[in-house]
Image (cartoon, helix red, strand yellow):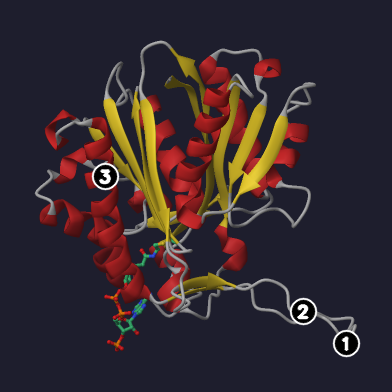
Amino acid sequence: MSIEIIGFGSAQAEKCVTNADLAKAVDTNDAWIQERTGIKQRYFSVSKNTSDLASEAALMAIQDAKIDPKVIDLILVATITPDGMMPSTASLVQAKCGLNAQNCLSYDINAACTGFIVAMQNAQAMLEAGYIKNALVIGAETLSKILDFNDRTTSVLFGDGAGAIIMRKSSTKQMLHYTRSEGDVHGTLTSDGLALNPDMKYDQVSSHYLRMQGQAVFRFAVRAIEDVIINVLTQTKLEINQIDWIVPHQANRRIIEYVANKMNIDLTKFYLNLDQYGNTSSASIPIALSEMKTKGLLKEDMRVICVGFGAGLTWGGSYFES
Ligand code: ACO
């Protein structure tokens, strides 16, 4: 069955933080960050939580799709920084966007930076099974909530933001996915939750800070991206020169350059905007797609591969035709 994306949206957090701004709070400098990552700035949220950014992106996608919001019957939010443990951020989006139609289901998906790919795959499965007709799929993060600004190896990499798409059945456009995970026994990329509390203490002490073994993640990322591109091309029976865009999770320019060089793919085929936003985890791919749509870079019938990779470890890709 064919699936199409009929609307794109995104939302930016309020505070632009350049590398120079960050260097006032963290022992780092612009030259190091740009050279090792390609990041120039990122946005941190001042008053908008994940559901607020997600709702803003959702409303833009609904407007772009020119649909009656009442037809949306599935809301998925991929996030690792939900507003709270419950209700789901997707349910908050449903309320904030006035999408309380009778036949709508909302839930969150946590597959870290692969979350948006997994959410698209979930939405496609629900569409194909006939359970739903119009899916609102969002990637949204306020990662600044889990950054330890005493840890310069992680706090310089991430930013906040949200992106959204609307998916529905199509008579012509193809979509398919490839997703994988491998339980991480080494704690390569983590953020802890609440501690158990059998002694009924009043104060829970926990560290939710994002921790990362940078070089191990780098090695995993290059393997993952190559695996995704090879597998998606095999499934589609297409050659790389028939693909118009590769939209990777925007983690680090050096990772993408390494893969492009290794796989002999022209770097210009990869859409990159991480210099402006940093790594926004689940939000990075839909933010990039929305920006491409706004800039007129996603033309009719283009072939696009999106690639995600992150904690879990998880990795995956989506192929679609614009
Ligand atoms: N500013 C200045 N110096 C720094 C900083 C910083 N922000 N961070 C580390 N350094 C120093 C280190 O202390 C070290 O100094 P030393 O040589 O005196 O000991 C030196 O820079 C080199 O440190 P490394 O950790 O070896 O630096 P590396 O070249 O590996 O780059 C980086 C670090 C950028 C994190 C790299 O490992 C990387 O890109 N990894 C992948 C990370 C990633 O993309 N994660 C996200 C993917 S998954 C997801 O999105 C959740």
Q: Which amino acid does label 2 sit on?
A: Leu
Q: How far apart are marks 1 and 2 (CA)?
A: 9 Å
The reply to whether residue 12 is in sight is: no
Relative to 62, 267 lies left or right: left
Mark 3 lies on a secondary structure that is helix
Q: How far apart are marks 2 and 3 (CA)?
A: 41 Å
| Residue at x 49%, y 36% (from the top left corner) | 120
Q: Which amino acid does label 1 sit on?
A: Asp
Q: Residue 196 carries which label?
A: 2
Q: Identify residue for label 3.
A: 231
Relative to 86, 58 lies left or right: left
Sequence-wise, which precedes: disc 3 or disc 1?
1
Asked whether the residues under the numbered discs 1 and 2 touch, taking CB atoms below 8 Å apart as contact, a structural biologist would say no
- Ligand 1 within 8 Å, label 3 CB: no
Mark 2 lies on a secondary structure that is loop
Relative to 115, 81 lies left or right: right
- Ligand 1 within 8 Å, label 1 CB: no
Depth order, front residue of 157/194: 194
Q: Nearer the viewer, mark 2 or mark 3?
A: 3
| Residue at x 50%, y 49% (from the top left corner) | 115
* Residue 3 image offset from top left, x and y in percent: 44, 22
Please say if 15 is above or below 254. above
Q: Quadrant of residue 97?
A: top right
Q: Identify residue for label 1.
A: 199
The reply to whether residue 161 is in sight is: yes
Q: Nearer the viewer, mark 3 or mark 1?
A: 3
Depth order, front residue of 214/46: 214
